[in-house]
Amino acid sequence: MIPRIFIYITLILIAAALLPPAITAYMRTSKKPQPRIHFIQDMDNQGKFRTQHENPLFDDNRAMRPPVDGAVMRGEIVDSEHLTSGTLNGTWATSFPSQITVNREFLQRGRERFDIYCQSCHGLAGYGDGIVDQVARDLLVNSRLGKGTSWVPPRNLHELTIHQQVVGEIFNTISVGKNNMPALESQITVEDRWAIVAWVRALQRSQNAELTDIPESDRDNLETVNLIPSNNEEEEADEE
């Protein structure tokens, strides 16, 4: 027969073994005013000075330091409202900021940025037929992935509603996004966003231009690359 003392010792050891898990479960499921016990402290207890405390490192013995000269609040506009927001006196700007010079080089920069950030959805010419849209439509029609899902096509930049938007509103859409379009202000600089606006305007103009928009001195060059029919081609068409 097992001595009773061994039975008591066994019961005590079992209870002691169950005690740590029970305490751990209690501490993890109950709310306490003090933080939990961390055996690995990491940065829980780091050396620092709290607000309104003394810090002998500085001459004034204050832990709280004044803002560094030139510091601004997050979201605060420190540049031209026209340049950074696309607005003037609270309304959309109808012209490019004075800091921006729209020339051929600027347009080429806009074309490059557009091709990197925009054309995958909006297409090279801005008709909303980029490769992302093409793949999405194909998946919806020909793949099991399309079942129960939907796709919102990118906007056609030649639609009348967008064509009528002023440059400030287009700039704002690029900056903060719209509908399913994400904000790009963290990825594209202010100047490059205005360059994209300029290229969008160039795309819109190119798809709605008339021959009279081209100086007469340049029309001969158009004929040499068959952009407009030559006199011989017109005569052949009449004969047919």
Image: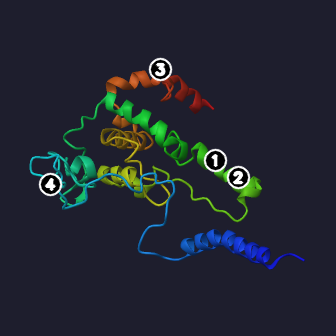
- Foreground of the two, 44 or 234: 44
In space, the residues marked 3 and 2 are separated at their CA atoms by 43 Å
Q: Residues within 10 Å of mark 2 (few under 14, many from 20)?
A: some
SS at badge 4: loop
* Comparing labels 1 and 2, the label whose residue is closer to the camera: 2
Q: Which mark is residue 224?
A: 3
- Foreground of the two, 190 or 132: 190
In the rendered image, the vertical position of residue 151 relative to residue 18, given as above or below: above
Three-letter amino acid code at disc 4? Arg
Q: Residues within 10 Å of mark 4 (few under 14, many from 20)?
A: some
Outermost residue, right side: 1
* Comparing labels 1 and 3, the label whose residue is closer to the camera: 1
Q: Residues within 10 Å of mark 1 (few under 14, many from 20)?
A: some
Residue at horizontal 25 percent and vertical 44 percent from the top: 96
* Comparing labels 3 and 2, the label whose residue is closer to the camera: 2
Question: Disc 4 or 2, which lies upstream in sequence?
Answer: 4
Q: Which mark is residue 134?
A: 1
Question: Disc 1 or 3, which lies upstream in sequence?
Answer: 1
Q: Are marks 1 and 3 in contact (CB under 8 Å)?
A: no
The residue at which mark 4 appears reads as: 62
In space, the residues marked 4 and 2 are separated at their CA atoms by 62 Å
Question: Disc 4 or 1, which lies upstream in sequence?
Answer: 4
Residue at horizontal 38 percent and vertical 36 percent from the top: 110
Three-letter amino acid code at disc 2? Leu
In space, the residues marked 1 and 2 are separated at their CA atoms by 9 Å
Does 83 sit left or right of 41 as displayed? left
**x and y, in percent, of residue 59 in the image:** 9, 47
The residue at which mark 2 appears reads as: 139
In the rendered image, the vertical position of residue 77 relative to residue 3, given as above or below: above
Q: Residues within 10 Å of mark 3 (few under 14, many from 20)?
A: few
In space, the residues marked 1 and 3 are separated at their CA atoms by 35 Å
